[in-house]
Image (spheres, helix red, strand yellow):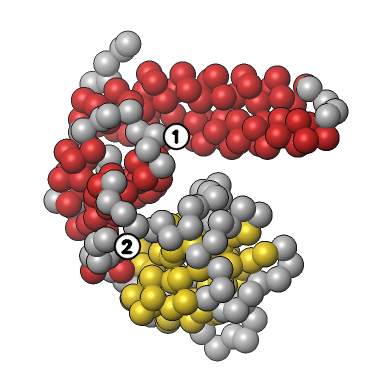
Amino acid sequence: MFQLTTASSRIILDVVVALTLVPLALECLAGARAAAQIRRRGSGALGPIVLSATACALAVWLAVFFVLPKLSNDASVDSRTGLVVLARAAQAGRWPGQPLQSVVDHARERRSLEDLAELLALAASGRPAWSTPLPDALFIGGARSGSDRRPLATFEGWSAHDAGKGHCEVIVYFRPRVALSGRELWLHEYPEGSHDYIDIAPVLPVRDWEPDALAWEVFRTAEPERFTLYAGVRSGADLGPPVLLGRVDRCAE
């Protein structure tokens, strides 16, 4: 494989790979869902399944030849999105033995990544869900929620970080009390002085988190500052009881 000679060239390649890998992974996920529906119904078009299988193969190829070697050689992940995705894989037990502690140590050295360094450390620890108090670093720019219990989930807290280009990255931490299959976390943003909310969609594909496990979803706000956040768990058209997360005057940098 060719070697890049400048830092800017490596960044450009990383961006190209990420922009290619994410749509392929989403198409792969859509194909898996379509296949499950065909299996339940006993019939359906196979064309989309073939296309999705190709997307899955390309996604695996990119991961094997670009993503995994980069993590193995550099033992670092320098983006917030990369650390969130890695933490998801680690908690699900799907990370193939790479040096995650080295990645954690590297991220802890960077102020902008210290919260996700602790998230990755928790996800990779393999400890029981309730055995360890959550570190304060997870809630930088936000706050703990005092383990706010709702019928479907217990909310632990949230963080808000500057995502650039006039947006904030909000991570909501919660523990499902039941299996959330068919349900999802929602986030509403109320701009200052407004009684109308903006419904913020998750950045990553929604995952079926296990009951009692530490779970998190990532959102990107429409406003960079001065807004209030509410969250809850949606079941169909029913939003369920809301939780007031708090007000953001300015996102943490």
Relative height, residue 2 to residue 157 (above, below): above
What residue would you read off at disc 2? 130
SS category of the residue bearing label 2: loop
- 1 or 53, nearer to the observer: 53
Badge 1: residue crowd in 10 Å (few <14, some 14–19, many ≥20):
some
The amino acid type found where label 1 is placed reads Ala
Q: Is residue 157 above or below residue 57?
A: below
Identify the image quadrant of residue 174. Answer: bottom left
Q: Quadrant of residue 166?
A: bottom left
Where residue 239 sits in the image (x, y, percent)?
66, 72
Does residue 114 appear to the left or right of 29 in the view shown?
Answer: left
Q: Position of residue 243 (x, y in %)?
A: 51, 79
223 vs 131, nearest the viewer: 131
Residue at point 21%, 33% (across, down)? 99
The mark closer to the camera, 2 or 1, is 2
- Residue 251 in view in this figure: no
* Residue corresponding to mark 1: 18
Residue at 24% over, 55% down: 118
Residue at 33% in and 76% down: 143
Give the distance between the C-alpha atoms of the residues marked 2 and 1, in whole angstroms: 33 Å
